[in-house]
Image (cartoon, rainbow, N blue to C red):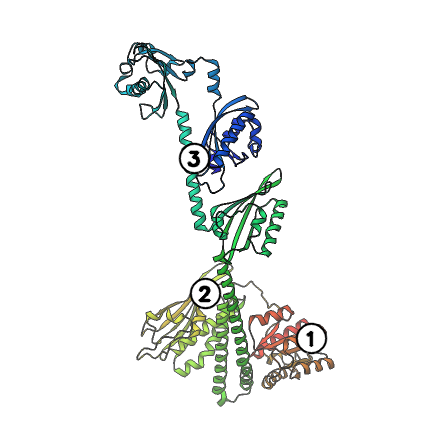
Amino acid sequence: MREVFQYAPIGVLLADGEGRCTFANEACCSIFGIPDRSMHGFGWTGFVSVAHLRQVMDILKEIEAGQKPKGRCEIAVMHPRLGTRYCCIDLCRATENQKEACPVVMYIQDMSEDRESVRRLNYMMTLIEDIVFEVDGNHVFKNVWVLDESKLFMPKEHFLGKTITHALGEERAPIFAGPVARTIRTGKQTTIEYPHIDAAIEKWYQLKVVPVVLHGGPEDQRFALAVREITEEVQRERALRETQVKIERSNELLNISQQLSQTGGWEYDLLSGEVSWTSQMYVIFGLPEDTDIVNFDTNVSLYTEPDQEVVIRSLEKCKVDLQPYTMELQVNTPQHEAKWVRVRAVPVVENNQVVKLIGALRDITKEKLEAIELLRAKEIAERAAQVKSDFLSVMSHEIRTPLVGIIGSSNQLNQIRLPEQEETINNLLFSSEHLLRLVNDVLDFNKMESGQLRLIQAEINLLELVDNIRNQFQAMAEAKGIALVAQIDVAVPARITGDPTRLSQILYNLVSNAIKHTDIGSVTIAVRKLAQSDNSVTLHFSVQDTGSGIPEVYHEEIFKDFRQLIQQPNQPYAGFGLGLTITKRLIELHDSHIRLRSSPGSGAEFCFDLRFTLPVEDTSTASGVVLVGSAACQGKFGSMKVLLVEDNPISTTVIKKQLEELDIVPDCAADGEEALRYLMGGSYAVALVDLHMPKMDGFVLSEIICREYPDIQIIILTADIMADTRLKFAKMNILGILNKPFRPADLVTELAKVKAAG
């Protein structure tokens, strides 16, 4: 409303019931000759005479009391530079609602020029604002007065002695003749306003017919016709009406928008202590609109006791830093509803002091309840995720622990096998490795769902990786009578940088599925180069089989979580499981996607493109240690004293045997307490510590070793490969971790790091 008033062409001043100015536009300040800041409060009254001021105040009080809707008076304003200025003031309420407190609007027009004309001219000349005609009772022109004859459409002599109709013509004459006839009939002054006869010219005029001589016959009567251009006044009035319409529309839109957004407006005058509300504020607080909300203390009491302190502290802080603030508060409603509001306050600063706060208050109860419910659901989900994580941790430990004995024993048998035992041992190794991969798949799937799976960057011997995959499945392919072929384009770089574990996992799952669903023909692993730059290469991988093929309708279905194809009649394949789901997600983790080309009877081809960086020349491992097999390391660790802490007797046997092959004779402890007795009696370079043990687990034992035996290097042996387990040990600065079951080469690698660091 104030923004609209600011650009009104006449003076506009908003005042409360006591006459205190709360707003004055630029035109008003110009009339009084003082700046906006000086107008506020009672500053404007000092420029008005006492008698005129009393007249204005009387009208204002009558309007405020509802005794009259509006009023008008004239006042004299003492302009600092121009002296006395005579003004006309129209007063009315800002809205028609008598119930709510609202300002009184004063529309002020400077009438000084008119008063100056009155002072200098006689009665007749006071009518000469533009043109004055003298006519008799017969409508005959007797005289013409005009300051600027150019305003007449013909010389003034041509009017004299002619009737209005004869002089002005049939088209213009009614504008003058009608009011003259009315004044002759009534004997009273007649005033009309009319537009320019040419609609294309935006001008307005006022015709005032004043009886001068009424006695005698028509030829003796005299009437003065004063014509004055009032275009600016009409435009001002039109602008004022438009402003009033805009104000009313703005108020209506404000009320509607506040209702729709459940937002109320408020104002707090720090100088007077008064508080003003919009109607929506009462709705939000559940109060009738006649509730007396007049001061700050009354407002504060509407909030809960803890939040009342928040309101007071925020106000005091605002007084100091002069900055807006926002709060979320809980409300005490008469209906005892659980209701929250968000309060936004903006300070009005004068002379570096906050004099007023203007703000908005929004009902956020729905958002708050939804947030509380969301938080409750989040807590439930986190508890469920923790239960799931704990279950997977226990499952991983329970399954992987016996696999230590199976895989370890199988590897030891493989070193001393007889020719006739080769197939049996190979099958045993393959089955145990397959079971281990299934366990890893489940854990990887959990990591993917929780967003914890991350790719590592290491150097990959691509030829060796593909060859290892082919060797793992060679026996299985031969058993089914199919060929397993690896085709690597000569342009493919031998060494790349990427995540070797995840790349192996992708190819392993695809080759495993291909062999499973192929009974005749072959399975082909192919790698070719698509593009290469100075530091990167893009490779195309494909695994193609000559199996029964997959109907197109199932091409999307086979990649969904835990989905299997429904076996069709006469179809030899049983479907796909978790492996393809993980494969798809691993490829997407590489910012790529997997594609399937297949139809019934034509086999299937799974392909994808991956981008790798190229390793720099003369690379080496991070520790500078060359990784070799246990046989090549015999005699190199003989002087290393090792403490093995393992509660599972089978695992102890397997690991002890692996250490002995490295010429290491370890001391073996079955639990943490026995390990402490060994530590007190000997000096060790390495402690191989199992994580899950009775009496004292690996976490507690490792903390004691770190604290009391800092020279001993700890290598954790664990079947729990959850991410938080590694994080706990990383915080203890223990980075050596062997995931059960581990290969002898993995043990050699960790021991070599210790030896190199020692």
Evaluate whether residue 115 shows in this view. Answer: yes
Which is more N-terminal, label 1 or label 3? 3
Q: Residue furthest right?
A: 681
**Residue 725 appears left or right of 487:** right
Residue 161: image location, x then y, percent: 30, 9
Labelled disc at residue 367 = none
**Residue 39 appears left or right of 427:** right
Residue 567: image location, x then y, percent: 34, 78
Mark 2 lies on residue: 588
Q: CA distance from mark 3 to mark 2?
A: 61 Å
Give, as a three-letter code, the residue at label 3: Thr
Q: CA distance from mark 1 to mark 2?
A: 42 Å
Mark 1 lies on residue: 705
Q: Return the residue nearer the eye: 36 or 323.
A: 36
Give, as a three-letter code, the residue at label 1: Ile
**Residue at screen point 32% across, 26% down:** 200
Which is more N-terminal, label 2 or label 3? 3
Q: Secondary structure at mark 3?
A: helix
Residue 102: image location, x then y, percent: 49, 39
- Position above or below: 40 against 594: above
Residue 394: image location, x then y, percent: 54, 78
Q: CA distance from mark 3 to mark 1?
A: 84 Å
Q: Secondary structure at mark 1?
A: helix
**Residue at screen point 61% across, 46% down:** 318
Q: Return the residue nearer the eye: 608 or 571.
A: 571
- Position above or below: 200 against 391: above
Q: Quadrant of residue 678?
A: bottom right
Q: Return the residue nearer the eye: 157 or 227.
A: 227
Mark 3 is surrounded, within 10 Å at the Cα level, by few (under 14), some (14 to 19) or many (20 or more) other residues, namely some
Q: Secondary structure at mark 2?
A: helix
Q: Are marks 3 and 2 in contact (CB under 8 Å)?
A: no
Mark 3 lies on residue: 243
